[in-house]
Amino acid sequence: MRMVLGSIRYLQDTPINWMPQLSAAIAADGTVIGPVYTQKRLSIPYSLLSREVIAAVLSAEDKRFFSHWGVDWIAILRAAWKDVRARRIVQGGSTITQQLVRNIVLRDNKRSISRKIRESFIALLIERQLGKQQILEAYLNAVYFGHGVYGIRMAALHYLGREPSMGNRFRRCSIARRYAKRAWSLL
């Protein structure tokens, strides 16, 4: 329980660059020697994300994000029903908050009932402490996009060659579509 409360305070009090960031080794003359990183990531504040990117990610991941308290019981029941009918796990019911908990607090991708219960409990606690924008910002800066790329800003730079807030509406949405495809391929 102490770890959970510490993690919530950490998410609440720390600026968005608390996650490992992309950096470079620079020679004495100022030339870049090469990248140095454990995770290829550049964070971006919520205020710089376009409405289209946010809407596309919410549409793919958590349609009721702004109306639940961290756990979407409707989504969990829907996923459980589909899993029972298929006799295997075919759909998840996790909210963005639960995914954030799984990837940052628990760091556990093993599917089990006990992990889901812990994840749900911590998600409810986080939702009581943080605002929806803080949760979405942390999630979009933490999510894995494939090819060693973490966070929506680095994904936009890697796959599209531009910031996620730049370009026309089509280009801003294409990074979110790429995210949705990657998310489904990981299931």
Image (spheres, rainbow, N blue to C red):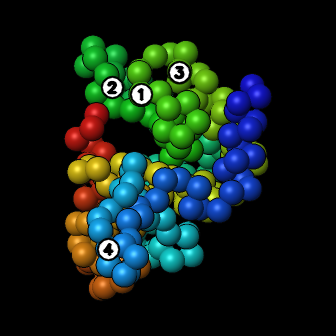
Residue behind mark 1: 109
Q: What percent of the width, then of the height, locates residue 42?
A: 43, 65
Q: Residue at x 60, y 30 (%)?
A: 120
Residue behind mark 4: 32
Q: Are marks 1 and 3 in contact (CB under 8 Å)?
A: no
Q: Secondary structure at mark 1?
A: loop
Q: Left of 73 or right of it: where is 86?
A: left
Q: What percent of the width, then of the height, locates residue 65?
A: 55, 52
User: How far is the residue under mark 2 from the one under mark 1?
Assistant: 20 Å
Point out the tag, 4 or 1, that comes first from the N-terminus.
Answer: 4
Kind of residue indicated by mark 2: Lys
- Residue 115 disc label: 3
Kind of residue indicated by mark 1: Asn
Q: What percent of the width, then of the height, locates residue 186?
A: 27, 38
In the rendered image, which quarter is residue 183 located in?
A: top left
Point out the tag, 2 or 4, that comes first from the N-terminus.
Answer: 4
User: How far is the residue under mark 4 from the one under mark 1?
Assistant: 36 Å
**Of the two numbered discs 4 and 1 in the rendering, the one whose residue sits closer to the viewer:** 4
Residue behind mark 2: 82
